[in-house]
Image: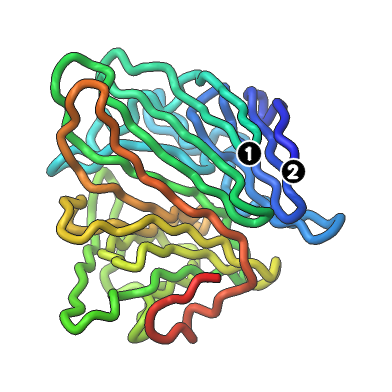
Amino acid sequence: MKIIETEFDGFEAIDIQTARAHMIIVTGTGPRIAYLAAKKGKQEGRNLLFWDYPRKYQRKDWALLGGHRIWHTRPGADEAEETYMTDSAPCHVRIGKRGVQITASASADALIQKSLTVTVENDDTFRVANKLTNIGEMLWSGGLWALTCTLPGKRTTYGIPLGDGQEWDVFTLVIPKAWGGHAVKVNDPQISFTEDCLILKPKGQKAKRMIQAPQGWIGMTDADEKISFLVHTPYQRGAQYPLNCNAAFFVGPKNFMVEMEHMAPERTLRPQESIENIQTWALRAPVDWGKLKGLYRFS
C-alpha cells in the first residue's frame, strides 16, 4: 500500500494504491473522492466514479464535478440553497499510515465544517468516514448526506437490498415526482423489484428513488468490468431520516452518471458536536441483484 500527494484534474489530491484498488481524493476543493478503480495484477480497470472534466454540470456558482461528496440536509428541506455551501472549499490534509483525514475550510455562513477520513481496511475495502461539525456558538440542526456519483457502463446495474428480515418488515419508498426543476416518471421501466431487492437498470432517463433500507447497502455491478462496487452505512432504527429514507438513487439524463446516496439521521448539534456517516466501500465479485434471496450476506 502507498499513499502519496498528487494532482488530479488541476486540483491537489491524495493518491491511495493497494494491490487491488486505486483511489484518488481531491483536496484542493471539496473534499471529494474523484477516482476509484479495481486492480487485478498489473491491470487496472476504469474509474467507476463519474468526473466532470469539461465542467458541463453547474448550478449558479456551484459545479457538480462528481465523485463522492458531502452535503447536509435540513429538517423538512433536504435540498435547500445552503446545501451547496462549502462544496468547493480548499482543504487541510493529514496523512496517516493507513489513510488520510481531509478537513474543508469552515463555512462562514452555515458555521459547519466538513471532513472526510479514508482508511484502508484491506486491499479492496475502505472505511469512509463522512463528518459534519458545528463550529459555531449556537445550535445547528440537520443531517449528513453522502453522495457518490458513479459512471455506468452499457451493462451496469444497481441494487438496494430490501427489508430487515424481521416479523414486522415494513419499509418506506419515496418517489420525488418533481423537484427543483427536475421531473421523473412514476412508472419507470428502469426500476424493478424482486421480493428482496430494488433493481435499477439505467437506460438514459432521469430517475430518482428514496428508500428506507435497513440493511444499509447500495451497490453497482459492472458486468463488463466483472466487479461490484458496494457501499454500506449502518441503519439506525427509529432515527429521524429525511422523508424516513436512508438511501437513494439518482439517474442523470442520458446516463451521464448515477448517484448512490446515503443519508444520516437529522439531529440538533451543540457547539463542537458532530454528525458522522460511516461507510464501508468494497470492491467485490459481481453481484446479480435479481438473484438476491433474503438478507444480503457480505463477504
Q: Give the x, y percent position of residue 196.
A: 36, 82
- Amino acid type of disc 2? Met
Quarter holding the N terminus?
A: top right
Q: Residue furthest right?
A: 42
User: For this view, does 227 lie left or right of residue 161?
Assistant: right
Pointer 1 local density, CA inside 10 Å: few below 14, some 14–19, many at least 20: some
Residue drawn 21% across and 71% down? Answer: 171
User: For this view, does 36 lie left or right of residue 290?
Assistant: right
Pointer 2 local density, CA inside 10 Å: few below 14, some 14–19, many at least 20: some
Residue 46 in sight here: no
Identify residue for label 2. 1
173, above or below 115, in the image: below
Q: Residue furthest front?
A: 97
Which quadrant of the view contains residue 43? bottom right
Quarter holding the C terminus?
A: bottom right
- Amino acid type of disc 1? Arg
In the image, 179 versus 100, the foreground residue is: 100
Earlier sequence position, callout 2 versus callout 1: 2
Which quadrant of the view contains residue 221? bottom right
Question: Do the residues bearing badges 2 and 1 touch, measured as CB atoms within 8 Å?
Answer: yes
- Tell me the SS state at disc 1: loop
Q: Give the x, y percent position of residue 204.
A: 49, 63
Q: Give the x, y percent position of residue 52.
A: 57, 39
Residue drawn 23% across and 47% down? Answer: 265
In the image, 175 versus 287, the foreground residue is: 287
Identify residue for label 1. 98
Residue drawn 27% across and 64% down? Answer: 211
